[in-house]
Image (tube, helix red, strand yellow):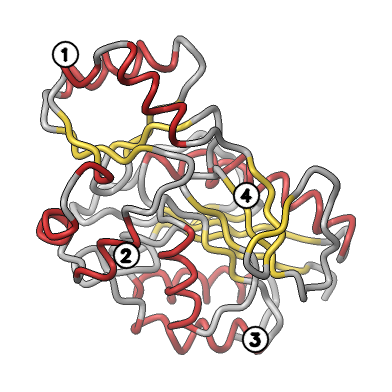
Amino acid sequence: MTELPVIFTDLDGTLLDHDTYSAEEARSVLEKVTALGVPVVPATSKTYSEVVEFRKLMNLTHAFIVENGAALYVPIESDIRCPMGSKLFEGYWVREFGVKRQALCDVLEALDMNGTYQFKSLTDMRSAEVAEITGLDLAAAQRAQQRLYSETLDWRDSEEALATFSHILTSIGFSVSQGGRFVHLMGPNNKGVAAQWFQALLKRELSPDVTTIAAGDAPNDRELLEMADYALLMRNERGKPLQLQRSGPTWLSDSAGPSAWAKGISDILTSMGWDI
């Protein structure tokens, strides 16, 4: 067996249940995958603080991508050397692809976006309000507000207004993406770019036979799913899958959430010759 799989996975609505934020139904498969030495790399719109907590809960030890591809964190103790241009932070080396959150806030203010459109940033809300909107407990809501590279917006205007808002910001070099719950404003980064960069590094550092598996369900997962060698396209909570352009092997889940994720990942690895 020559292929070395690396699993890049979205969290909300994919590995996590959309309503409970639990991944328990996938725990046994995660444990089997980890025992086989297959890295599981969260690639999410969540913050650094949120993913650190999730990794601890699920006993994950590999790298992770936060805030829609804005930064990649790799444990210092891993076998992957820290490349030039990276920085050290709390036991990780970090590769940044995004812009700082303050730059995004400055643009929104300069263009009077808050006065023109109806939305509210999670970072401007009370933590109790974030908890109410998301269903998170208060501590988890506070972790969700600790954004370094993006503005997460609770969009309260029309779809037409969102299209105009997106056009204005993308025309000057920023990105606007829709996740399962919120609209994300960020720099010219996405999950796919960060994953491709890391894949190239893994091919140099670990093995030229690194093969990527990606799992996701929302528009902000599109680039990640398109770049992967194998894709697990998850149905969203409404049962409708994202439309992709890829021609490579693609699995469509039966439903949303951790149970469907576990089955899809198991099927893909089995097709690659891994006993899972």
Between 272 and 5, the residue placed more toward the observer is 5
Tag count: 4
The 10 Å Cα crowd at callout 3, few under 14, some 14 to 19, many 20 or more, is few
Nearer the observer: mark 4 or 1; the answer is 1
Q: Quadrant of residue 163?
A: top left
Residue drawn at 29 percent across, 36 percent down: 183
- Give the mark nearest the N terminus, 4 or 1: 1
State the image coordinates of residue 78 (x, y, percent, origin top left).
Answer: 77, 73
The residue where tag 4 is placed is 228
Q: CA distance from mark 3 to mark 1?
A: 55 Å
Residue drawn at 37 percent across, 57 percent down: 234
The residue where tag 3 is placed is 275
- Give the mark nearest the N terminus, 2 or 1: 1
State the image coordinates of residue 238 (x, y, percent, origin top left).
Answer: 18, 52
State the image coordinates of residue 271 (x, y, percent, origin top left).
Answer: 62, 71
The residue where tag 1 is placed is 116
* Residue 170 falls left or right of residue 204: left
Residue drawn at 43 percent across, 56 percent down: 47
Q: Badges 2 and 1: C-beta atoms under 8 Å apart?
A: no
Residue drawn at 84 percent across, 61 percent down: 209
Mark 1: which secondary structure? helix
Between 28 and 161, the residue placed more toward the observer is 161
* Residue 20 falls left or right of residue 212: left
The residue under label 2 is which amino acid type? Asp
